[in-house]
Image (cartoon, grey):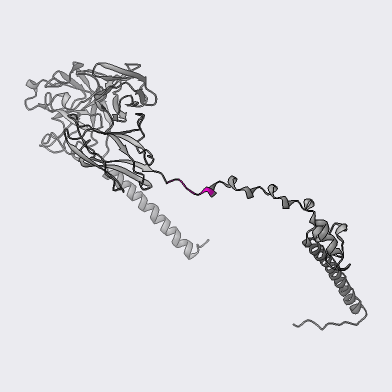
Amino acid sequence: MRVLHPFRRAAAVVAACAVLALGVVALVASQSQPARAASVGEFTLTPGSGKLTDPQPFSGSLEIPGKCPDGGEPDFNWNSVLTMIVVKADGTEARVQEGITNQAPYTEATSTVSLAAADNPDVVFQSLSSVITGNGTYELRVRCVDNFSWSPAPDAVAPGDPYWSQKITVTGDDWVVGEGAKATNAALIASPPNAEPDQEVTLTATITPAEAAGTVTFLEGETTLGEAPVADGKAEFKTTTLPLGVHDVVARFTPTDATKFVPSESEPFTVRVRLAQFEMLDDSGKRLPGTPELQRGQTVKLIIRRCEPNTAFTLAMDRNDGTFPGATSDADGTATWPELTVPDDAVEGISAWKISPVCPGDAESNLDAVPFTVPAPPSESPSGDPSDDPSGDPSDDPSGDPSDDPSGDTSGTTSGSTGGDSTTGGDSASGGTSTSGGASPSGGLASTGSRIALFSGIGAVVLTGAGIAFVRYGRRNGLLTFGEPRS
C-alpha cells in the first residue's frame, strides 16, 4: 500500500474540507434566498381600452389563470386580496388599484374577478395619469398580497413573488391592451443659448431610444424653423434667422414607422437673441474683435449696453493716468463714447477701458471693464537692418585682391634680397610662395608639421618591428629567459 507523504496527506485533507465548505455555502445560499419569479402567466383584462384620466382606471373584470399561495395559518393568507400594479418607465412599480377581493379566495385554477367598486367594498384606486407620463407600452401586474397588509414590503410578498402580467399601449390619453409602439423621448439644446443677430445657432435634438428612426421638426410655437432626420439618436439644425428677442423652441419627433415608435415632443428650450453687451469700433465703423490690439494714438468708439438707464458713467484706462470723457446711458441703458484715443504713453500688454459704476448687464455677471491689448513700442535702432552696413559686402574692399596691389612686387624684391635662406628669401618673390606673393605664412608651417608627423610615424613603426624581432631572436637563442609564473 502506498502511503502519502505527511505534507501531501495534510494538503488532501485541507482540499476536502474546502470542497465541503463550498457545498454548504451553496446549499445555504440557495435555501436562504427566496426565489423571485417573473410572470407566472398573463391575465385577461376586459374591456381592453380606456382613458388615463378615468378616476378608476379599471372597472370591468380580469381573469387570472392560476391560484394564489396559501398562508399556512388560519388567519393569515395570500389568497384573499389582489393588487393591480403599473410598471413605470423607470422600472419602478406603482399601485393603481388595491383591495380587489371579489371572488376570493383565489384557490382555483382560474378565477374571473369583477373590478367594479360595488363588488369590492374596500377597493382603493387612482387614475393612470398620475403614474404614466408618456406614450408607449407599459406592463400591468396582478399580485397576491397579505390579507393584513395590502402594501407589503418587497421582502414580505408571497413566497416566490408570483404575479400575472399584461401589456397596455398608451397614446395621449388613450390606452389599449397589447404591446404596441415603443415610447420615445425628445430632448433639445441650443448652442449658443444667447446669440447675436445673424449669429449661427445650432439646435440639437436627442431622441431615445437611439434606434428610433424618423424626423425632428424644430418649432417656435406653430412656426416651423426647420427639419432634420434622426441619425444615431441625434437630429441637428442650424439657423441664422432668429430675430432679436426671446424664443422658446421645441423639437417634435415623428417616427418613420408609427407601429414601432411613438411620437414625442421636447420641453421648450429658450434661445435669446440680442445685441452684444459691449462693442468697440474703429474709425471706419468696423467692429473690432472681443479683445482687440489697439495702437498708441488710435481712436475707437465704445458702446456698452444693458446698463441702468439714464446713468452717468466715468471712464478710465487701466495702468494709465490719462483723462477720458464720460457718458450717460439712454432710456434703453446704452452708453456710448464716440471717440476714445489710446494715449502715446500707454503701457505695453493687457489693458482695459474701466467704467464706473458697474453695468449690471446679465444675471450671470456685471460689466466694469472692456479689455484690449497694447503692442510693444517699435525699435529705434538703425542697426537692425544689416543691409545698410556698407562693410557687409567684402567684394567692395579694394584690398581684398592682392593681385591689384602694385606694392606686391616691391616687397617681394626687397625681402628676397635680404638673404637666400631667410623665411621670405628661401622662396623669392618671383617664385610665387613668399609672404607678399599671395601664399599665407601658415602654409609653410602646415607643410612642415605634416612632414614631421609622417617621419615620426614611420620611425615608430620601424622601432616597434625591430623590438619584436629582437625579443623573438633572444628567446630562440637563449639570450632571454623568463621565470616560472608565480602560483
> Is residue 379 part of the magenta span, yes or no?
yes
Residue positioned 69% across, 47% down in the render: 396
Residue farthest along the right direction in this orientation:
477
* The quadrant where residue 11 appears: bottom left
Spot occupied by residue 5 in the image (x, y as percentages of width and height): 50, 64
Question: Residue 471 versus residue 3: which sits nearer the camera?
Answer: 471
Q: Position of residue 365 (x, y in %)?
A: 24, 39
Q: Can residue 175 be seen in the rendering of this structure?
A: yes
Indicate the quadrant where residue 292 lies.
top left
Observer-nearest of 50 and 108: 50
- Residue 483 vs residue 390, the one in the foreground: 390
The image position of residue 432, as x and y in percent, is: 85, 56
- Chief secondary structure of the magenta portion: loop
Quadrant position of the C terminus in the picture: bottom right
Of 223 and 145, which appears nearest the observer?
A: 223
For the image shown, how many numbered marks are present on the structure?
0
Can residue 438 be seen here? The reply is no
Q: Which residues are magenta?
A: 377-382
Please say whether residue 338 is one of the residues in the magenta stretch.
Answer: no
Above or below: residue 60 compared with residue 455: above
Residue 349 x %, y %: 38, 46
- Up the image or down, 318 lies above or below 92; here it is below
Look at the picture and state if 99 lies above or below 8: above
Measuring 36% from the left and 44% from the top, which residue is drawn there?
A: 344
Whether residue 65 sits left or right of residue 374 in the image: it is: left
Taking 417 as reference, is 242 left or right? left
